[in-house]
Amino acid sequence: MQDWVLERLQQFVGRGDREALEQRAEKALAWQQMGDHGSYRVVQNLPALGRGLVVIEEGVVPEYSRVRRVFHLTNAIVKYYYSPFYIEEQVPGYHARVAWSGGRQVAFIRDGRCCAFTSDRAPDFIPAPFFAEHPELAVGLTVGGKGTPYARPGYRGDADDVEAWGTEIFELGVREPIATADKYALLEDYGIAAPPHVGPFEAGDLAELEAWMKERDEAGGQGLLLKPSERHHRPLKYALPSAIQRRSPAWLGFDNALAGDPYLERLAQAACAATELRLGPESWDFEAVGRALLEPLAEAAAAVAAGEPLGEDFSVWLHGEAAAEELLAQLEERAPAGSIERQSLEPEGDGWRLRFRRLHTEATAALERRLSGASYRD
């Protein structure tokens, strides 16, 4: 392990964690390389070193803290919060932290791995002056749209079919994100999109907050995040009732899905949220709920019964050819329950069009076993 790694970690952890730090770091850190970029990531949780933390020469990119879920938002506010807070709409997409390293923007997904796609596209959403003036900061992005390599369903994603929102801003070497109001101010100053949000609120503003929650639910919102005004407070997440009507892929965690756990969790979230917003059972569209829960399973079973493996086709656009090659390698590495089939990589405009297919081999096999008539113990 290079000397600078331990130096950065010594500055990051508290005084009481420094004594055994070298031994812990040897156990927890893994080297990763993406083109000319090299960094270390934490691959297992240890005291003071959370999984997903990244060490670059410029400093430590802190891990994402685990966000606790609540089923009744207004009661949770009274229970946990005494300072002003903000409510932020949960935007669809995957999470990445973007830092300035080696003279360019480099993105790390939640587990700390480099992401070639996000690194290639991040400058489209974070203007160059931001890092020129704040190289000591990292931006937490949520990246969505139909043109990402993780979107579903597969779609011809053009350059403008990717969108991103700044959800957090971190200081290198500091575990907690900066204060929420300061984050919004920086995002606005540099033209980085922020998720829809309201606030600050006090605990006495619950009637106004409830009206906004109903408005977001009627618009088909996914959920909300309660963001504290002070940096040391933890955020909370909350699913809106309408979230139950979103389709989810049947083949992801297929065995667990058949056991019922994900279904029960989604139903409990929706039922509690509907109670909070005083939406009685008579207001539910039960046909839409049933379709969202069962239609993907029925489609998956029909496809496998017809001899078709479960899979998705993707078409994404990137600025650089090398980024496309790196992305394919990273996707294959992260597909333990399936595989990635490259279809084509061709010039398009001032960039490159990459097409590939993601096959869900383990989920296909799980359905094939059940369709074969195999017996299972209840």
Image (cartoon, rainbow, N blue to C red):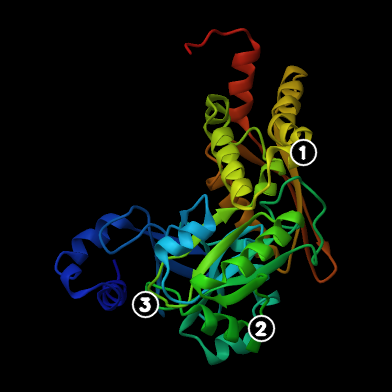
In this view, which residue lies farthest toward the bottom? 133
Density class for disc 2 (Cα within 10 Å; few <14, some 14-19, many ≥20) is: few
Q: Amino acid at mark 3?
A: Gly
Residue under circle 3? 173
* Pair 3/1: label in front: 1
In this view, which residue lies farthest toward the left? 19
> Is 91 placed above or below 307 here?
below
Q: Earlier in the sequence, mark 3 or mark 1?
A: 3
Q: Earlier in the sequence, mark 3 or mark 2?
A: 2
Give the residue displayed 73% in from the left and 25% down from the top: 298
Q: Amino acid at mark 1?
A: Asp
Residue 41 image position (x, y, % from top left): 40, 61
Give the residue displayed 52% in from the left and 39% down from the top: 336
Front residue of this view, candidates 39 and 118: 118
Give the residue displayed 45% in from the left and 68% down from the top: 38
Q: CA distance from mark 3 to mark 2?
A: 23 Å
Residue 285 image label: 1
Q: CA distance from mark 1 to mark 2?
A: 43 Å
